[in-house]
Amino acid sequence: MDERLNIYEEKMQKTLKNLSEEFGGIRAGRANPHVLDKLRVDYYGTPTPIQQVANVNVPEPRMIQIQPWEASMVKEIEKAILTSDLGINPTNDGKLIRLVFPELTEERRKELAKDVKKKGENAKVAVRNIRRDGNDAFKKLAKADDISEDEIKDLEDALQKLTDKYIANVEKAVDEKTKEILTV
């Protein structure tokens, strides 16, 4: 593959990776420790991910258990969860924090599925914008007279194939996440 296309493929890969990280934060009725990925707690004045100050595990399908390494962190972690957009009230016994995920209603599942589709559309737009940037860059090369029109056409075709591949990957990821959410 032409090294001029590598930049655009890397950007498309990052878009897909970002999408799967966003999907990781969407809870589908099952406890998924990734819903905590974006939360930070104040650890001696430094915002720190919960996973770096506590053991996080899933003892049951709809429960996350957080066991801080320091007892003083229980309140901090509880505060971070309460101020987040998780919508779950933590319970703590002084040593452990438990997050119990309620069964999702059908209405909530449909809302989440719409949200997944919207995130997927945004990712597709990002991939298409990367393609547009690539095509613009190739046209500039043509104007600078560095390469022939045939080479430009080949680069544009290769970039289109890459775009199609990543759009298909985005659609597949959206379908899988939607199926996961709608499965009771």
Image (cartoon, rainbow, N blue to C red):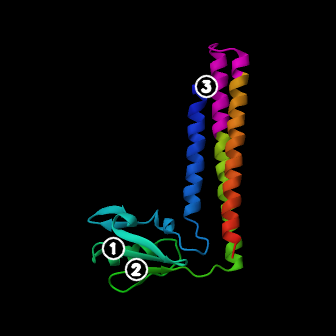
Q: Is residue 112 visible?
A: no
99 falls in the magenta region: no
Residue 180 rendering spot, x and y as whole percentages: 66, 67
Residue 138 location, quadrant: top right
Label pair 1/3, CB-CB below 8 angstroms: no
Residue 93 rendering spot, x and y as whole percentages: 36, 86
Mark 1: which amino acid? Pro
Residue 46 lies, with reference to residue 29, above or below; the image says above
User: What is the chief secondary structure element of the magenta stretch?
Assistant: helix
The residue pinned by badge 2 equals 97
Q: Earlier in the sequence, mark 1 or mark 3?
A: 3
Image quadrant occupied by the C terminus: bottom right
The residue pinned by badge 3 equals 2
Q: Is residue 37 visible?
A: yes
Mark 3: which amino acid? Asp
Q: Residue furthest bottom?
A: 93
89 on left or right of 163: left
For marks 2 and 1, give the CA distance.
8 Å
Q: Secondary structure at mark 2?
A: strand
Label pair 2/1, CB-CB below 8 angstroms: yes
Tell me the residue at 70%/54% (across/down).
Answer: 172
For marks 2 and 3, give the CA distance.
52 Å
Give the magenta-colored segment's residue range: 130-152
The residue pinned by badge 1 equals 68
Tell me the residue at 37%/80% (across/down).
Answer: 96
142 falls in the magenta region: yes
Tell me the residue at 67%/36% (across/down).
Answer: 131
Mark 2: which amino acid? Ile
Q: Earlier in the sequence, mark 2 or mark 3?
A: 3
Q: Earlier in the sequence, mark 2 or mark 1?
A: 1
The crowd level at tag 2 (other Cα within 10 Å; few <14, some 14-19, many 20+) is many
Residue 163 lies, with reference to residue 106, above or below; the image says above
